[in-house]
Amino acid sequence: MDPTSQDINLNSPNKGLLSDSMTDVPVDTGTTRTTIPEGMTEAEEEELRSELTKVEEEIAILRQVLAAKERHCGELKRKLGLTPLDGLKQNLTNSWHDVQVSNAYVKTSEKVGEWNEKVTQSDLYKKTQETLSQAGQKTSAALSNVGSAISRKFGDMRNSATFKSFED
């Protein structure tokens, strides 16, 4: 029977009919007792054993149905072009969203924002920022001057008699 056309309806007369690869699902049948437990009649024990067998059969069927559903899910994902990487990306996105809306993250963000506000408003920060800005401007001007000087030297070299003799 084709695994994609399996009947997985639990009320169907064909329920649980799967390929040979799924028929070997282990079912714990328990151990056979030779004595009846105290306070229990043979009829009660037989009824319980019958019920146990039915429940174990249902468990086996549910395992087979789950396996069929998982195969079907995989096939649908494959047809839609969804890869495991897509699933991982979606899980990471959802997890990151969950982190961002968590109380701990929100409270931490608020605290960091408060600290940032306090730091950026302090006199020490403003003085440091101004000093670094001036240092950056001076460094930029110095590098520009060095670049101009190097360009000038290369120009002078190119116009020299020695360089011209190499060109010829």
Image (cartoon, helix red, strand yellow):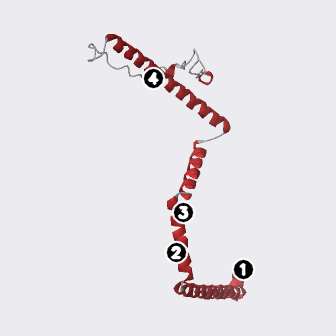
The numbered mark, 2 or 3, whose residue comes first in the sequence reads 3
Q: Residue at x 54, y 52 (%)?
A: 95
Q: Quadrant of residue 52?
A: top left
In the visual, does 54 lie left or right of 145? Answer: left
Instruction: Please name the amino acid that badge 3 sits on.
Output: Val
- Residue 162: x, y in percent? 68, 86
Q: Earlier in the sequence, mark 4 or mark 2?
A: 4
Within 10 Å of disc 2 (Cα), the crowding (few <14, some 14-19, many 20+) is few
Using the rendered view, name the quadrant where residue 18 is placed: top right
Between the residue at mark 2 and the residue at mark 3, the CA separation in whole angstroms equals 14 Å
Q: Quadrant of residue 87?
A: top right
Q: Observer-nearest residue: 96 or 157? A: 96
Q: CA distance from mark 1 to mark 2?
A: 64 Å
Q: Earlier in the sequence, mark 4 or mark 1?
A: 4
Q: Secondary structure at mark 2?
A: helix
Can you identify the residue that label 4 sits on? 25
**x, y (%) of residue 102?**
53, 57
Amino acid at dot 1: Glu
For label 3, the residue is 106
- What label does residue 167 carry, if any? 1
Q: Nearer the viewer, residue 88 or 135?
A: 88
Q: Earlier in the sequence, mark 1 or mark 2?
A: 2
Tell me what residue is drawn at x 57 percent, y 42 percent.
Answer: 84
What secondary structure is found at the residue carrying circle 4?
loop
Distance between the Cα atoms at labels 4 and 3? Answer: 48 Å
Instruction: Please report contact status of discs 4 and 2: CB closer than 8 Å, yes or no.
Output: no
Where disc 1 sits, the SS reads helix
Q: Comparing marks 4 and 1, which lies closer to the viewer?
A: 4
Asked if residue 125 is positioned above or below residue 91 in the image, the reply reads below
Quarter of the rendering occupied by the N terminus = top right
Residue of label 2: 115
Crowding at dot 3, Cα within 10 Å, few <14 / some 14-19 / many 20+, comes out as few
